[in-house]
Amino acid sequence: MNVLRYCAAPLVALALTVSSSAFAHDAGDPSEKVTVLQDQMLKNVPGKKALMIEVDYEPGQSSIAHKHDGTAMAYVLSGSITSQVKGEKAVTYKAGEYWYEAAGSEHLVSKNASATEPAKLLVFMVLSPDEKILVPLKN
């Protein structure tokens, strides 16, 4: 039960942070599935934590335009993901490929590049405990 108690707070915080993305999609197009794998304070970097999440996209699914308060590194576990950060061209990454996003980068496009196959990302972030994982962008 200690594990459940330990994981409950980060899961609730993540659910509240990303819940706005669920409302940004039509009822027939639900939001991507986000699973917190690890959420740990960093002993060697006071005031910062490391967060590891898995993002599952159904075929054709996408995230809303957003930014991350923290630094993010993404690795494609399966399928292919199209990603675009403001000021850069959209790039499609295949399984085994990865990218970096500096804190505060505006992530304009993050979507499954396939209309027929699912895709999965592993995302590692470093941020302060009070910083938001995902901040929706206003038009």
Image (cartoon, rainbow, N blue to C red):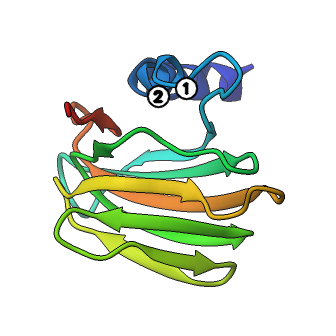
Report the amino acid beneath label 2.
Answer: Leu
Q: What residue is drawn where x is 69% and y is 48%?
A: 56
Q: Report the front residue among 68 and 130.
A: 68
Q: Report the front residue among 106 and 89.
A: 89
Place of residue 120 in the rendered image (x, y in percent of width and height, measured from the top left)? 69, 59
Element under disc 2? helix
Residue 42 in sight in this render? no
Q: What residue is drawn where x is 31% and y is 54%?
A: 107
Report the amino acid beneath label 1.
Answer: Leu
Q: Where, quadrant-wise, is the C terminus in this rendering?
A: top left
The circle on residue 14 is 2
Asked if the residue under mark 1 is in contact with the one under mark 2, i.e. CB atoms within 8 Å, the reply is yes
Q: Decide if residue 38 is on the left or right side of residue 67.
A: right
Place of residue 128 in the rendered image (x, y in percent of width and height, measured from the top left)? 22, 43
Q: Decide if residue 22 is on the left or right side of residue 56.
A: left
Badge 2: residue crowd in 10 Å (few <14, some 14–19, many ≥20): some
Instruction: Identify the residue under disc 1.
Output: 11
Across the whole image, how many numbered discs are drawn on residues?
2
Relative to 50, residue 8 above or below: above
Q: What residue is drawn where x is 26% and y is 49%?
A: 127
